[in-house]
Image (cartoon, grey):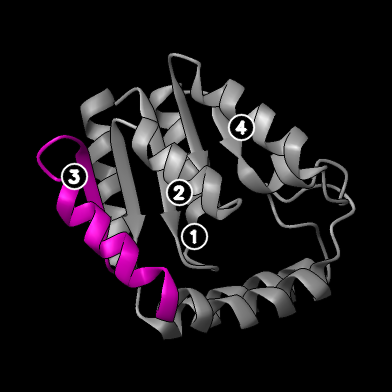
Amino acid sequence: MDKVAIFGNAGAGKSTLARRLSELTGLPLYSIDIMQFPDGRSLPHDQYLKEHAEVLGQEKWIIDGYGCSISIWERLAAADTLIYIDLPLINHYLWVTKRLVKGMFITPEGWPPNSPIWRSSMAGYRVISLCHRNLTPRYRQYVSEVKTSKEIHHLTSPRQIRAFLKQVSSNQG
């Protein structure tokens, strides 16, 4: 596990899992949201793609998030380990809501500074069904196609996420 891509729908807990996995493994963590919105404003797309390519060229990394259709597929191809968080839709809506409520009081951990919490949360709500309809089938197909060439962790419940982290923790000790 040297190059880890964590992906899934909005509100899946990708960033939380990525932070914990980085703590457990010592692998450097790169958040797509922070790469794209370093100060709460969008980085020019070409500059984002250049920085993303630079991270992919490193020997070790954990990257969580989507980015864009170009960068997600490049990242999945470059990773040796894929962690696909594929939860029931209700979990995504509940976790975006939880982040919105918490975000009214404190900036969610791992979010770019000065991020518009309300607007970002509303965008998250809109993205969930679109991602489920358009990307989820493609993600599932991709994971199925590369299962013999990459380490795959297809996590389909909060319980599986906790069990995965517990397993990683016990392997590190």
Q: Earlier in the sequence, mark 4 or mark 2?
A: 2
Q: Earlier in the sequence, mark 3 or mark 4?
A: 4
Q: Which residues are magenta?
A: 133-156
Q: Could you tell me the amino acid type at mark 2?
A: Leu
Pick whichever, 86 or 147, lies toward us: 147
Label 4 to label 2: alpha-carbon separation = 20 Å
Residue receiving disc 2: 17
Q: Position of residue 145 (x, y in %)?
A: 16, 51
Q: Earlier in the sequence, mark 1 or mark 4?
A: 1
Label 3 to label 1: alpha-carbon separation = 23 Å
Question: Which residue occupies 21% across, 28% down?
Answer: 171
Specify whether residue 137 is painted magenta.
Answer: yes
Label 1 to label 4: alpha-carbon separation = 21 Å
Question: Which residue occupies 35% across, 32% down?
Answer: 79
Q: Would you say the residues marked 2 and 1 are in contact, meaning their CB atoms lie under 8 Å apart?
A: yes
For the N terminus, give its image quadrant: top left
Q: Could you tell me the amino acid type at mark 3?
A: Val
Tag of residue 52: 4
Pick whichever, 82 or 93, lies toward us: 82
Residue receiving disc 1: 13
